[in-house]
Each structure stands twice: as structure tokens, then as C-alpha cells.
Image (cartoon, grey):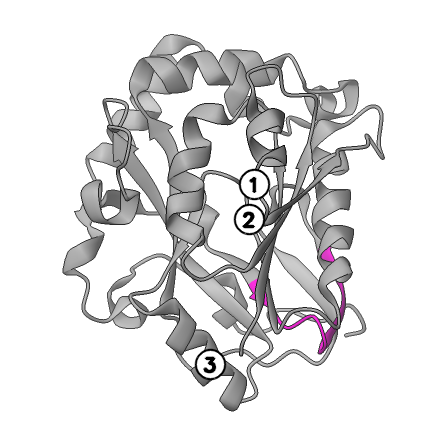
């Protein structure tokens, strides 16, 4: 039986955890979650789940929250080597979606694929979704967005190491890198789950940025004022499509894909 593990970080994500588990639990067997001192009950809820291994997020880079998260994403998944057929590396608000993910991963395994890209969408919702929602089904509108097109599903027995860029927008691998011939998986970024709730979350997250993050403008969107934040929301809303209407994401997603560009560097030892 195919086994899938997911590795992520968490901080005060209690309102989003139900959506996260409702999406992933049908096809992920175990979750490795590094909590960064949540104060909203997130850690307690995670600790109560038998399918979660809860760890404390250690700040590997005291001056940078972004690099500390990158360290987790580059190292945590290696705990699944020899235990899982596939690992998923994603944030709590990133819902990797395929209509039949289990069968798709089995097919990719049979074809020798070792790393699977996901086509990015900035999902849009003005109001906080109701409890019990399955987001991809009940809130399917989002704008195609290259910034969220990422490589974050991989074979831990075939990939030796990862070197993600800050934010995981790009990555280079050591090991055997084989991509699928077509891009079928979607990365549904459910950050905008209610305008007011998301803006307040931005303000809270801004306080966690370190001096290096501020100097390099990593996480700069957390520092936006309300006008800039709402303008970004409306810009994405104006380009939003219903992802449930897509019949061929590989052909229909209009944004550039860095892993398909001529000269794209996917391996560390190029």
C-alpha cells in the first residue's frame, strides 16, 4: 500500500486546521508538524491527533523566520525516508489538489516520476468559510499565479536533498529528478479566507519576522497597509476562475512554469 507523509510548520493556525485536515487526511497517512509556539490552541489540537507527529519549531536562524522555516522544509521530510513512498512539503494554507490524488501518485510511481510540480492559484474568498467546508469543492475560485507554482511532492527514496529558495518558490534537488510529462496537480493557496481575518493574520505574522527578513524584504506582504492589501485581493479576484471547470490544467493554466523553461536548473550539481 502506498504511504504518503506531509511535512509543514504551524503557528496559530487553529481556524485553518480543520480545512487542512479535511483536505489532506483522505490521502496522507502521517503529518509531521513543527509548531512555533502557537497560543490559540493549535498545538493542543495537533497533539490530540494520532496521525500527527508534533515537534517544536527550532529557530535555526535566529535573525530570520523565513530561513528557519526553509530549514524545516529542507530537512524534516528526510524523516520519512524508508517510511513513505511520497512526501508532501506544504504550508497549512496550501491545498495540493488532484481529482484522484491516490491513484495519480500510484501512476506517477509506476512511471518512475520522482518530483511533481503543482500549478499555482491564489484562491479568493471574501468571507470566512463555514465550518465543515471542503475548500476546493465549496470555494473553488482563484487566480492562476506563477508565484504559487511549486515543486513540493517528491519521492524520499530517490531525492537525496532539497535546497528550497525562501518561500519555496523554487528548488534544486540532489538525486534522481524525473518530472511528469504533464502538470496535473494544483496548488490552491487559501490565504484569503475572509478579508478582515486575513489582514489581522498579516499583522500578527509581521511581528514574527526577524531583522534579516526585514532587510531582505522576505515576508514583506505582512507589512502592507489595508489599502495595499485590499488592492492585491481585488487584483487576484479580477482574474479568478472556477478551478472545478478545468478539464486539462496542463493546457489551461496560463502562467509560466519555471521548471519547464529552457535552461531550468533542477539539480544542485548542474
Residue extending furthest toward the bottom: 111
Q: Which tag, 3 or 1, sits closer to the chain's start? A: 1
Q: Which mark is residue 90?
A: 2
Residue assigned mark 3: 106
x 75%, y 33%: residue: 57
User: Circle 1 sits on which residue?
Assistant: 49
Per the image, is 157 magenta?
yes
Q: Is residue 193 left or right of residue 148?
A: left
Q: The residue tagged with tag 2: helix, strand or loop?
A: loop
* Marks 1 & 2, CB-CB < 8 Å contact: no
Against 154, residue 64 (above or below) is: above
Give the number of the mark in front: 3 or 1.
1
Residue drawn at (41%, 35%) of the image: 18
Predominant SS along the magenta part: strand
Q: Nearer the viewer, residue 129 or 53?
A: 53
Dot 3 or dot 2: first in sequence order is: 2
Alpha carbons under labels 3 and 2: distance apart: 20 Å
Label located before the other in sequence (1 or 2): 1
Q: Which residue is drawn at the image coordinates 52% and 11% (left, top)?
A: 203
Q: Position of residue 67 (x, y in %)?
A: 75, 37
**Which range of residues does the magenta coloring cover?**
153-163
Residue 259 can be seen, yes or no: yes
Amino acid at each position: 500500500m502506498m504511504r504518503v507523509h506531509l511535512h509543514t510548520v504551524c503557528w496559530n493556525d487553529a481556524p485553518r486546521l480543520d480545512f487542512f485536515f479535511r483536505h489532506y487526511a483522505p490521502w496522507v497517512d502521517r503529518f509531521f508538524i513543527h509548531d512555533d509556539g502557537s497560543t490559540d490552541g493549535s498545538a493542543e489540537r495537533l497533539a490530540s491527533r494520532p496521525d500527527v507527529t508534533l515537534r517544536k519549531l527550532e529557530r535555526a536562524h535566529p535573525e530570520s523566520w523565513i530561513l528557519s522555516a526553509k530549514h524545516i522544509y529542507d530537512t524534516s521530510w528526510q524523516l520519512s525516508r524508508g517510511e513513505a513512498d511520497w512526501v508532501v512539503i506544504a504550508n497549512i494554507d496550501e491545498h495540493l489538489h488532484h481529482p484522484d490524488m491516490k491513484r495519480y501518485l500510484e501512476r506517477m510511481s509506476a512511471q518512475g516520476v520522482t518530483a511533481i510540480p503543482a500549478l499555482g492559484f491564489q484562491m479568493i474568498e471574501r468571507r470566512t468559510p463555514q465550518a465543515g467546508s471542503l475548500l476546493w469543492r465549496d470555494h473553488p475560485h482563484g487566480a492562476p499565479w506563477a508565484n504559487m507554482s511549486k515543486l513540493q511532492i517528491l519521492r524520499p527514496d530517490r531525492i537525496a536533498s532539497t535546497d528550497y529558495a525562501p518561500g519555496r518558490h523554487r528548488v534544486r534537488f540532489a538525486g534522481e529528478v524525473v518530472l511528469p510529462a504533464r502538470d496535473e496537480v494544483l496548488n490552491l493557496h487559501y490565504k484569503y479566507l475572509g478579508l478582515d481575518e486575513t489582514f489581522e493574520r498579516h499583522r500578527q505574522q509581521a511581528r514574527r519576522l526577524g531583522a534579516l527578513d526585514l532587510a531582505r524584504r522576505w515576508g514583506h506582504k505582512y507589512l502592507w497597509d489595508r489599502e495595499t492589501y485590499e488592492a492585491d485581493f481585488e487584483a487576484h479576484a479580477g482574474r479568478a476562475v472556477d478551478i472545478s471547470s478545468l478539464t486539462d490544467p496542463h493546457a489551461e493554466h496560463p502562467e509560466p512554469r519555471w521548471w519547464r523553461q529552457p535552461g531550468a536548473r533542477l539539480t544542485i550539481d548542474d
